[in-house]
Image (cartoon, rainbow, N blue to C red):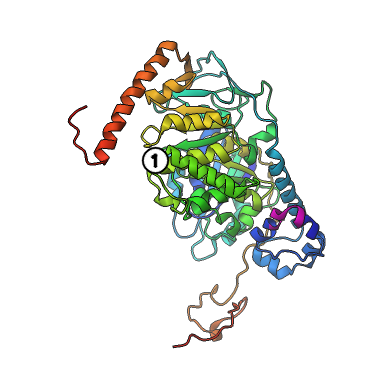
Amino acid sequence: MADLLRQMPCAADFFTTLGLAIPPAEQSPAAYFVSLDAELLEDLGLEREGLEERFFAFIGLLESLQAGRSNALIESITILGGHDKSGRPEEFDLTIRPGEIVSIVGPTGSGKSRFLADIEWLAQGDTPTGRSVLINGELPDPGLRFSIDRKLVAQLSQNMNFVMDLSAEEFVTMHAESRMIEDPPGVTRTIIDLANELAGERFSPQTPVTALSGGQSRALMIADTSCLSTSPIVLIDEIENAGIDRKRAVRTLVDRNKIVLMATHDPILALMGDRRLVFKNGGISTVITTSPAERANLVRFEEMDARLNAVRHALRNGEMIEDI
Amino acid sequence: MRLVTVAGPPSSGKTAVTIKAIASLHREGVRVGVVKFDSLSTQDQSLYEKQGIAVTTGLSGNLCPDHFFVSNASDCLSWGKELGFDLLVIESAGLCNRCAPHIQGVLAVCVIDNLSGVDTPKKIGPMLKMADVVVVTKGDIVSQAEREVFAHRVRQVNTSAVILHVNGLTGQGGHELGRLLLDAPETTDLEGKLLRFSMPAALCSYCLGQRRIGSDYQMGNVKKMDFPKGEPCTP
């Protein structure tokens, strides 16, 4: 046991999460499970048979988590069109690669959520839309569907909140530890610094996450997702009102080689996309490639945005808003 | 007929996700029935009815709802067979974290929600640790980081279950849950089948209606706490 715990300190979590004492150093896992008191097991809601098997499954999980970091990354995701709610076929095959931004537009109920669910579930013609998803141009391994440590989609949206009673530093450290990365304090510092760059107003590592403003929360979520989430796809749902440098936030994710899917009607964000998917009646009706003229307009939208921001800033400082 | 038990703490979203999964199965023409267990009263019957789902309710009154469930499990199965369902879902009352209504050889689903906090998976007994499918709900209102930590903690206590995120409001993930429910093994008879784990033991004088406090009034399966020794506070 001592050898095992030296090689893999996290293995001790198996015992603590089940409410068991850490086995003595000289005992083998099997001998330890045999030695446990029947009444104690009953109280903890555990059965002796199967404990050893569960322990080795747990070790297997830790090994796969550690190995997962060096795994070959996803090079592309291809979505083969299905049909909309009326059965009309979708005429597109879409391949997206890491570092690309794809915007998603369309009214509520037009099928945006279903599209993301299709990607997350790795649809193989077995969802209501009949779409199929390929990874690196091939049929994905079915085991990937249920693998929580290789989950494809990370999600960030306006109505998400932090609910834990922890400081920003404790919070990010806890996430880093669950990812089993090597330097949690270092990563935590990086994430909090990055979040502070994205947020309009600074916060300290000791600030409780529940006390962060909307903009600060969003900034911390984006910084955390870009550095710690293993999901290759990040879905951003409506962050337009978040009060953060949203262009920079999206760039941060793309720079980390994420595929960014953005459901947004904010012109600055939507036109940042290389392509945009137009949803109607549960299906993708068109795929628009952002044109050079649109890109040129983006510059003008950014100027307007900067002017509005300057007014916001002036208001915050108690200035008069007469000359604009 | 396929049989599924759905358990989970109170307000975790058992009924909401079951309804979303069944709605998706209905579209494919699968005939589904539900037995809902509860203790005093339940609104869930009408929630199912509103969606056009065949449902019946078992109210346990002053009995432990999970003991009541096991006593009636075979009858639930007979009811489902009589009405000719393809799939029968039995939803537990979900009152205590220790209860274990799951049956060997019957697909066991546990529903827990992200809002209950990241230490919750540790605190839930066989209901979670021995489930085949763990449905995690309310992911739309917590951060991505919390969802990831929560799923990791679930994985720590149940290394083999399928973990699925379902949104009980929008139904995202409901279709996928429906597919998993349809994979449940056929159950023709429950007579002689085993629960996956023993229910919390009972049978003390309080089970039998005693209301008075004191050791003279305690009989049967009584367990006493250990208190730490210490110096009394100085005045």
Q: Chain of mark 1?
A: A
Instruction: Indicate yes or no whether the magenta region holds residue A212.
Output: no
Residue A247 image offset from top left, x and y in percent: 43, 29
* Image: magenta residue range: A5-12
Res A33 quadrant in image: bottom right
Front residue of A227/A178: it is A227
Q: Is residue B205 left or right of residue B140?
A: right
Which residue is at 65% across, 51% downward? Answer: B156
Res B2 quadrant in image: top right
Residue B223 image offset from top left, x and y in percent: 61, 76
Residue A140 image offset from top left, x and y in percent: 68, 27
Q: Is residue A66 left or right of residue A191?
A: right
Type of secondary structure dominating the magenta stretch: helix
Relative to residue A132, is residue A36 depicted above or below? below
The quadrant of the image that shows the N terminus of chain A is: bottom right
Decide: few, some or many residues near mark 1? Use Cα within 10 Å; few <14, some 14-19, many ≥20. many
Residue A79 image offset from top left, x and y in percent: 58, 21
Front residue of A296/A18: it is A296
Three-letter code, disc 1: Gly
Relative to residue B180, is residue A168 depicted above or below? below
Tag 1, which secondary structure? helix
